[in-house]
Amino acid sequence: MTAAADRAYGALRVGILDGRYGFGDKLGEIEIAEELGLSRTPVREALRRLGSEGLIEVLPNRGARVRTWTAKDLEETYELRAVLEGLAARRAASRIDPAALDEMAGLATTMTTVDPSLGHRPAGDFAELAALNGRFHELIVTAAGSAQLASTLQGLVQLPLVMRTYRRYTAAALARSHSHHREIVDALRARDGVWAESVMRSHVLAARAVLLDSHREDAAPLEEVS
């Protein structure tokens, strides 16, 4: 991919993840090229890459748009994540080094100190919490020592990023998530792969329940758009 295409890809990806481009929004090559000061060719390359990652969809004779998500998409994605992240945790238990464990423990603690539901940040400001959570999970996948597993999971984690998952959590759901993080660290310190896998699977499936509840309450942003 050329430098121009990389620039277009980066700008579009950030725009999708931070909500500037909403579910179902059309992404016209001409408009984006003009906005970014680029030709249509690098924009087309960027859209193709985003499509391969599942962030956008290209419709015949209708161009590209930000992908929408149905309840079925949520269920399938999180079922896969539960299996694969559980596997990553099991593998990590016998491979993770003390420094990574210490960092994870620190992240788990810090997440409780920046949680807006506990009054530590302005209501709705989940950016730091999401970043810390992303790093926590990244350390586990890295410690699992499987490039193929990491590559497969990279595509699956796009969904919670796009949906800005933490905004949909209740205070009780966040408290449960923090508890899971601490228990995952305990399981990894114990080098118990079965325990680590079990907690991670529960952690991911609990997140799925949050999103499905949110879908039932406010389905419009997730339903397929004609």
Image: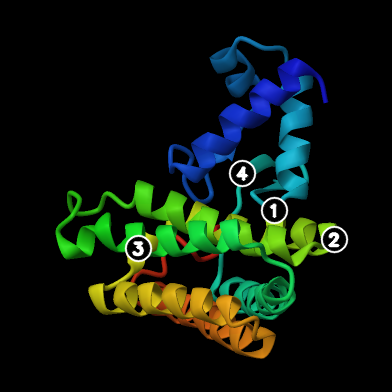
Nearer to me, 196 or 24:
196
Circle 1 Cα neighbour tier, 10 Å, few/some/many (<14 / 14–19 / ≥20): some
Q: Which residue in the rendered view is the most extreme toward the left?
A: 119
Of pointers 3 and 4, the one earlier in the residue sequence:
4
In the image, is residue 60 above or below residue 93? above
Q: Tell me how far mark 4 sits from mark 2, CA to CA.
A: 29 Å
Between marks 2 and 1 in the image, the one whose residue lies nearer the viewer: 2
- Lower position in the chain sequence, tag 3 or tag 1: 1
Q: Is residue 45 left or right of residue 206?
A: right
Of the residues under marks 3 and 2, which one precedes in the sequence? Answer: 3
Picture coordinates of residue 77 (x, y %)? 64, 72
* Three-letter code, disc 2: Gln
Q: Can you identify the residue that label 2 sits on? A: 148
Tags 3 and 1 touching, CB below 8 Å? no
For the residues carrying marks 3 and 2, which lies nearer the camera in this image? 3
Say the numbered circle drawn on residue 109. Answer: 3
What amino acid does circle 4 point to? Answer: Arg
Residue 214 vs residue 224, the one in the foreground: 214
Could you tell me which secondary element the residue under label 3 belongs to? helix
Q: Residues within 10 Å of mark 3 (few under 14, many from 20)?
A: some
Amino acid carrying mark 1 in the image: Gly
Select label 4 or label 2 by which is in front.
2
Residue drawn at point x = 40 percent, y = 64 percent: 108
Name the residue beneath numbered marker 4. 65
Q: Could you tell me residue 63's position as x and y percent?
A: 70, 38
How far apart are labels 2 and 1 at the CA level?
18 Å
Q: Amino acid at mark 3?
A: Thr
